[in-house]
Amino acid sequence: MDDKNLQDLEQKYKSIAEELEKAKEELNLQTWGLTKTNDAIKILYKELEKKNKELQKLDKLKTDFINTVSHELRTPLTTIRECISQILDGIHGSTNDAQREFLSICLGDVDRLKRMIDDLLDIAKLEAGKVKIARRQLDMAGLARGVIAAFLPKAKSMNVELREKFSAEKMMVYADKDSMIRVFTNLIGNALKFTNNGYVEISVTEMPEYIECCVADTGRGIAEDDLPKVFGKFQQFDRKEGGGEKGTGLGLSISKNIIDLHHGKIWVESKLHEGARFIFTLPKYTEDQILKEHVAEALQEAVKQNTPLTILVFADINSVAKDLERLVRQNLRHADVIFKNTHTMLAVLPGMGREDAREGAEKILAGMDMSKGISYGMVSFPEDGNTAELLYAKITQRPSASHV
Amino acid sequence: MPKKILIVDDEINVIRVIAARLKASHYDVVTASDGLYAVQKAHEEKPDLIILDVRMPVGGGRGVFENLRMTSDTMMIPVIFITAYADDDLRRYLLEMGAVDFVTKPFNADELLEKVKKALKEEVEKKEAEKNG
């Protein structure tokens, strides 16, 4: 090799060496950067753990507060109410008319105070996320009819007509029965309070994606300025004179909270002197969507409480569905039982790990007729996934596990 | 012979008003204002029914109930719980454990008396059914 070639090679070598040195420096810098990031992540993680513990503590404080306030307010009310009631009932001697009149006023207001405490605590629970609604497929038309029937005597005594208008005989919706009764009771009760004569019309209409419910009255209506405040707390607008319970001003706030929990919408349309229409909608759910909701809610709770979650999937249940459901409810007390279709049943087991769930399932199947050929599978968090989509995907696969 | 009812609540005034109501309805009444004393009274007096506050400092209503359930001479006494609690899980648990009923504070006197009457009637029917085999 001649001198020129050697020099060229030496130059190239130097150049590569310099580039390598530069790359090495850059790598060192990046390593340093990554180490710093890693340290920062560890600190953030510790912070998150700390915040999580604080949140859990706060959550428990909220529950304790609600329960303590409930007890502390209701106990003196108990003695006040009973004392007045016993005097009125003549247990402690006779009373004159004037005494009875004023004691009755007291009793009425004690009961009103009780209703306010009940409503306030309901709102506190709703806003603290402490209310567990048990949604099931229910017939909204049937439910509305039941509430309307309960109001008939009152409406008749007030000379107000109750009308119903349903787009179908039966309309299924995925909702909590007690909550829906409460909302209808609140809206119809309000409508009657604000209607002197005329009618209150309750309608339930089935739309493609949702069910729409409306309580419309021919009452005094609501001023435009007051419309935005209607669903706020302690809002009471001038009601007509007359007897009947005075409200707490919290009913619509509670109704709105309930509808929000159901992922629905509620609003009011009204003009002064032209009546009011209170409308709420609830989304319609397919069987699959209902199942996904159950899984998502259970998973959310498991993550929040840092507990496991197992879902037992029983297949080929067919004719033994009722027996199986009974055995599941007896042996797995906190199970949320959902029927995916006529041959598949799920038991969502919050707080239960795989081994306990397996033990429970074996015990249940041991109580079944062995010839029926029921199989079961398990899907659990965190082993099978940490998102509702992952868990749901595993659930919809054919279960593979024990076969009895 | 009038039926005997044991009232257990840590609030003396609550005991007084419930006692007055029950006596006016011709029941005999005995009382206790804490959990330990309640268990002792239950053994001594063998009441026909116990009205028991869920939330009490010493022993707690739930603790008293579980204790009474463990001894043969008190386990069959029907218990009606009084509660201000909004806790559905606790109610379900206690009903499953064998409490016959619940009354929520502040209660309606007619409701309390109805539930007392029903619990005592069911107890008599149960005892008669056992006697007849």
Image: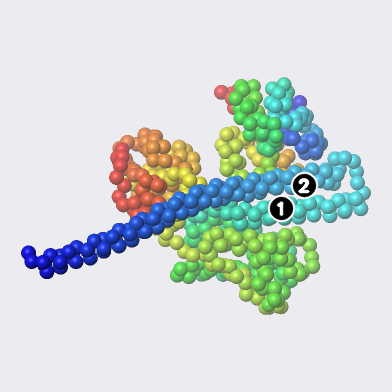
- The residue carrying mark 1 is A117
The way the protein has been coloured in the rendering is rainbow
Q: Tell me the residue at 72%/41% (across/down).
A: B112
Q: Is residue A23 left or right of residue B29?
A: left
Estimate the x, y position of residue B131 in percent, counting from the top left: 60, 23
Estimate the x, y position of residue A65 in percent, counting from the top left: 66, 48
Disc 1 marks a residue whose amino acid type is Ile
Estimate the x, y position of residue A168 in percent, counting from the top left: 50, 67
Asked whether A64 or A84 is in front, the reply is: A64
Mark 2 falls on what kind of element?
helix
Q: Tell me the residue at 31%/38% (across/down).
A: A404
- The residue carrying mark 2 is A77
Say whether residue B25 is visible: no
- Crowding around mark 2 (Cα neighbors within 10 Å: few <14, some 14 to 19, many 20+) is some
Q: Tell me the residue at 49%/65% (across/down).
A: A283
Disc 2 marks a residue whose amino acid type is Leu
Say whether residue A331 is visible: yes
Write down the chain letter for disc 2: A
Q: Is residue B72 above or below residue A112?
A: above
Asked whether A320 or B43 is in front, the reply is: B43
Q: Is residue A123 left or right of residue A177?
A: right
Estimate the x, y position of residue B40 in percent, counting from the top left: 71, 23
Callouts 2 and 1 close, C-beta under 8 Å: yes
Q: Are marks 2 and 1 on the same chain?
A: yes
Mark 1 falls on what kind of element?
helix
Q: Is residue B67 above or below residue A283?
A: above
Q: Is residue A197 above or below residue A106?
A: below
